[in-house]
Every structure is written in structure tokens, then in C-alpha cells.
Image (spheres, helix red, strand yellow):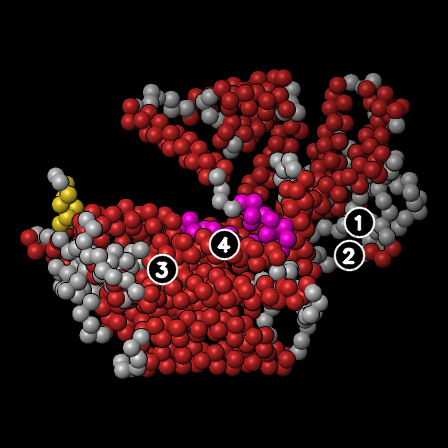
Amino acid sequence: MDDEVESIEMKPASMRKTFTLRNKVARQAAVNFMPSRKMAYSTLRLRRVSSEHNALLEASMSDAPDAVEKQADIIVREMEQHHHLMEDNPLSEELRREALRDLPQGLTMKRNIRAKLSASVSLRSKRRPISMFKRMKYRISFTWKKSRDHFRDFIFSIELWYEAIRNIEGHLGSAVGSYFHLLRWLFGLNLMLSIFLISFIVVPQSLFDNGRNRTELKFVDFISGMGGLEDTLLFYGHYHDGIISTGPFQYNMPFAYFFTMVSLYLLFFAVLCYRTADSYRRNFIEPAGGGGGGSAVRAALATKLFCGWDFGVASPRAAALAARALYHEFRELLNEQNKKKEVSSIWTKIRQRLTNIVITAIVLGFIFGILYGLWLLLSVEDLTDNREIYISLIITAVTAVCPIMLHFIVKLEFYTARTALYVTLARTWLLDIGILMLLLVFWVQSDKSCWETSVGQEGYRLVALDVPVSLFLLPGIELIRGLLFHYKFIETPPEFNIAYNSLTLIYNQSVLWFGMMFSPLLVVAITLKFLLLFYVKRETALRACQTGKKVWRAAQTQTVLYALVALSLFSTLFALGSLFLRSSPACGAFGGYGRVYELLTEGALRLSQHSAVFAVLHFVTRPGPIAFVLVALCVAVYIARARAGAQRSMARLLRHMLRLQAKDKDFLLSAIEKVSNGEWLYSPKSEEYGADSHTWKYVNEVRKPSNAGYHFDGSRLSHSFLERPRSYVKENRPSSYVERQKSNEDGDTDSSFSWQGSSSYLNQNDVEKS
């Protein structure tokens, strides 16, 4: 081989150029048979790149005067596709210089390309002095970004209960940790609500009261919310319906109450929607990458495997907790990846589906039966003296017992562990929201002079009676079961019931959404309850509960919990917007208005004095414009879904191309290994494919794939391909071949083609002839 190289170097320059071109031919013939070039389809971009590559090879092999210019134009056109190279700044100039340095071209060609690129950059550049408005806009945006980053770092540095939640995840896994993450997030949300309500509503009213309305309180009043607590800051009926004057300042209490409540409802609804969408994107869309559920699990597993360890951990205790948390997360991911789908017959599937449908119908009937019984109970007026307390006790018992019943009922159905959790959450949420909607409808239709205060009292009683159940009764039962398991009295340890505990949080938050309008300080009560609940549940989980036998990933579960909280707020907005239209004239901040919306139309906007604005609003609220907006939203949703489908198709195509690129690497590595071992000649055709080699058929008929990067033209070479090249592997081979039908797939080629040694043999043959 060294002798061949020395003999080639002794030849003239034109002959060496011919050898170089033939090497390119052989190399391109090998590229044509890589796996990525055998795709049955190609995008327009691939075809454009392929055609430009063909033109580049033809220009490099041509001796025409304009061949160099043509080749330079093709390279410049390719580099212009990269926008970061074509900007008029020092960084792009340095990138262009590096790109030119890496080009496998001569110095003359590089100078020509650099001149063309400089001219193109000069035409593209639009450097103008920045105006004062743009400069101010840039400064504001930079300042906002820096402030946001500093605030995010500050929040991260004071993250509440971080070590406690990491400890829980280390002992019980991320599924249990998702409950505590939800509890911490709801606590922060309610804390912000409490600050706003106290600042804009409670404090001005307390300044107006100035210590008045002091009444004697009894113990039963703290449970029922009636008696001495009825006319206090706790409920809607106590708030003033006029302007509050404090020295030289005046405060319009109806406006403050209305706009504070509406702003907080809409603001936190937007926050919940963003949180739910962001959690869905992080836990469903990004891990999948446009693929199926299996790819999502593999991606999450790879992320945890290579990027899961926190190298900032310094103490051995923190390292042990992090290791245990990673162990539980690997266990969850591997359990989901290795789960096997049971193969069952069609009749078995029909029986399972029918069982699920029948049980779901029974459960829905059970829920509506409870709601109907509650309505009848509310309609009975002459029950006892403390009728309201007993009704609230019955509702609290229903909301405490029914989730446990639904948890056992779902075991009769044919669901996976995660699907069973979702079904239980949905059924219990429907029961809780149905009870709250029923209470609101009942009191709105009642003849009570201040029904708003009654709704606030219902919410207060539900929260007050749920405190002993959530903070004492259920944790005590779990601790007793843990002690019995510890001393071997029972065989199964208590498991942390994620569904039941999460539904307790969602139920309390739903009561807050419904009661916040009619009892502003109810938010403060639920915030304090969540604070105590975290420490009680932490001790119960660490001391009494064990890791569940059924393991699943908790990321999607956390998304579902956020979605249920958002749906609770949406149901509240729908109920208040539909039912809270008339206000009681005898009490509350809206007592001076017959309808609640008159506070906005007559009080703030004064539409009766502006007929044009009133006519516009009257036209906008008619069914026709509303229907047009709904149709436009439907069209926008359809367009968004179509774009998402196109992006998923492109993602699948790119993923397939990446797999083919990986196969290209294996192909080239195996080819390099064979070349290094001295296998330079054509491989013989296996006997099962016929009497002749596909290589001979390829060379004679000049056959190539449709998406190949090079058009093989034998007439351009100085020697003829009409003579079959001699094989050193097998001397006596038949000269005829059996015709076979071409494949229907465009670009299909026989994988038995071997390019090894083609250029060397052609060069050797040409040397012998010369």
C-alpha cells in the first residue's frame, strides 16, 4: 500500500487530481448507501441540500472557468442560512473567520468566499443609531429581567419547608412528596390572599368601627359562627356600604370590596391556570418530546441517571436523604417502564369496560342521592335549636367518610394504580363541589334578609368542624396503627393515602373559594389550618406510615391536583357570576345597590349618563357578538391543534433522522475498521441473491437513490466502466446476473453493495494503463 501511495505521488499534478476526484467518487458512493440515505421520503430541505451538494461536487470536478465561482456561491449560500454568522458584530465576524478556517478548501477559494460573505453582510446590515425610546425600552427590559432573576434567587434561598419535604421524599418517595408540595404551594397562595384582604378590606373597616359593636361571645358561637360572631369583621353583613372617612382621607368601601374581590379571583385564577399549564408542559410534554409515554419514561430516567445528583450537597445526612430520594424515583420510573400490559381477549375487555361503566353509574347515582338528601335536610326548618351545627356536622361526616368508601369501591373496577387514583379524585371532587354549589343555591333562594352572611357562616362551620377531623382524629388513627404495627399486633403498616389527604386540601381550598366573598377572614383561618396541618402530617408520615406497595410516578399526579384546584376556582366563578346577582339591601357593602353589577355600571362607569357607551356595551353583550367570539375561539383552538399536530409529525421525522444518523456512525465505523484491516476490494455477492453482484449492476446502469447526495456519471471519468473490475476474492464468477424487480420504495438499494477498495482499484487500473 505504501508503494502505491509513493507511485501516485510521483505522477503529474493533473493525474493526482484525477486520483483525488476518483476517491471522492468512491467516498460518495459509500455515503449513498448509508442508512440515512435510504429514507423513502425526504423533506424539501433535504432535497434542496442534496441538490446543492450535487452541484458542489460537479463544480469541484469541472474544469470550466466559472467552476470556482459557482462552488464559492454554493458555499456562501449555505453559510447564509445560519443567521448567527451573518450579523454585523464582532462575535459573528469571529464565527465567520472560524468557519472559513475549518473549510476543506484552498486559500484562493477561502478568500473568494470571505469577499462574498463580507458583501452579503454589508447588504444585510442595518446599523442605525438607537432612538431614545428604544434605549429606554431596552433599559427597562434589562432592569426587569435582572430584578426578576434576583427575586427568584431570593425566593429560592428562603424556600419554605425545603429540608422537611426532602426528608419526606427520602423516606416515602416523591408520590407522598407531591402532597406536601401542594400543601406548601396552597399555603403560600392563601398567605398572599390574606395579606391583600386584610390590607384593603379588613383594616379600613376596623378603623371605621373603632372598637364599636362589642358583644358577649359564647362557646357555641365559635362553632356556629352565629350569636356574637355574626356582626363582626368575620362576615360580609358587617361591612359598611358607604364612604369611610378617616381624617382627610376618604375610602369608598363598596368599591374597595368589589374590586378587591374581583381582582383577586381573576388574578389567582390566572395564576392557577399558568401553574397547571406549566406543570403539564414540564411533566407531560417536555419529557415525551413529542413521542409516546415510553419515550417520556426513558427520558425522565436518563435525566435522573445523568443529572439527578446535586453536587452542592455537603453534609452526610443530606447526601443520604438525596440518595434515598433518588432510589425511590428510580424505583417509580423503572416500575412504570417495566410494567407489562396484560393480553386479554375481546370478551374480557368488554366485561371489564361494562363493569367500570356500571360501577361509575352507581357511584354517580350515590352522589346525586346524597345531594338530594342534603337538600331535603336543608328544607326542614323546625329541626332543633342548633339546626345549622347539625347540618354542618352531617356534611363534614359525608366529606370525611365518602372518600374512604370511594377508595374501596374503585378497587372493584379494572384500573391501574394511577388511573384508580385519578378516578377517586374526580368522584370525590364532584361530591365536594356539588355540596358547596347546593349550599350556595339554597341560601340564594332563601327569604333571609342577609343571605350572604348565612353563606359565610356555612363556610366557617365547615372549616371549624373539619379541624378536629383533619388535625386530630385521622392522624391519631394513623399513629395508633403505626404503633400496633411496630409492636407486631398487625401485619400491614399504614400507608400514606395520597388521594384522601390531597382531597382534604382541595376540599378546604374549595370552601375558601366559595366563602371568601362572604367571609374575608375565612382565608386567614384556612391559612393557619394549613400551617398546622403540614407539621401534623409530616410527623404522621415519618413516624407511622410506610412506602406504598404500588409505585408510580408522582409528577403527573401533581399536575392533576393543580388542575382540580383550578377547576374548583372556575366553578366558584361560574356560581358567583350566575347566582350572586342581587344583593340584600339590609346588610353588607353592596346594600346600596339592588344588583351587584350596578356597582360597576352605575357606581364606577355611570353608564346612565353616557348613552353611547351604554349602547356599545349593550351590543357587545348580545348573543350575536358572544357567539362570534365563541366561534373565533373554536377556530383558534382548531388552528392551534393543527399546528401542534404538524409539529408532532416533524418531531417524529427528526427523531427518525436522528436514529438513522446513529446508524450512519455504526456503518462508517465498521467501514473504517474493514479498511484498516486491508479489506479494499469488492465483496462477493452471496449465493442467495443470484448469480451476479449488485455492484456490477449498479456501475453498468448508473443506478442511484433518488435522494442520494451525488449523481454518479461514469462518462466524466477518464477510464471506462464497461469492463467489469476484476475481483481478487473470487476469480471465476459468472458474467451474467438475474434480473429482479425493483422495489416500490424510492431509493431502495441492495445492502450487499460494498464500496471497499473501489477507488483504490480504479486508481491502480489507471496507473497500469498510463
Say which residue label 4 marks: 534
In the picture, residue 127 is in which quadrant?
top left
Asked which secondary structure carries label 1, the reply is loop
In this rendering, which labeled residue sits more in front, label 1 or label 4?
Answer: 4
Say which residue label 2 marks: 739
Q: Give the range drawn in magenta.
A: 162-189
Of callouts 4 and 2, which one flags the residue occurring earlier in the amino acid sequence?
4
Q: What residue type is labelled 3?
A: Leu
Q: Residues within 10 Å of mark 3 (few under 14, many from 20)?
A: many
In this rendering, which labeled residue sits more in front, label 4 or label 2?
Answer: 4
Say which residue label 1 marks: 752
How far separated are the C-alphas under marks 4 and 2? 78 Å
How far separated are the C-alphas under marks 1 and 3? 72 Å
Q: Position of residue 455 (x, y in %)?
A: 28, 67
What is the magenta segment's predominant secondary structure? helix
Of callouts 1 and 3, which one flags the residue occurring earlier in the amino acid sequence?
3
**749 or 415: which is nearer to us?**
415
* Residue located 82% across and 49% down the image: 693
Q: Position of residue 200 (x, y in %)?
A: 25, 47
Q: Which amino acid does label 2 sit on?
A: Glu
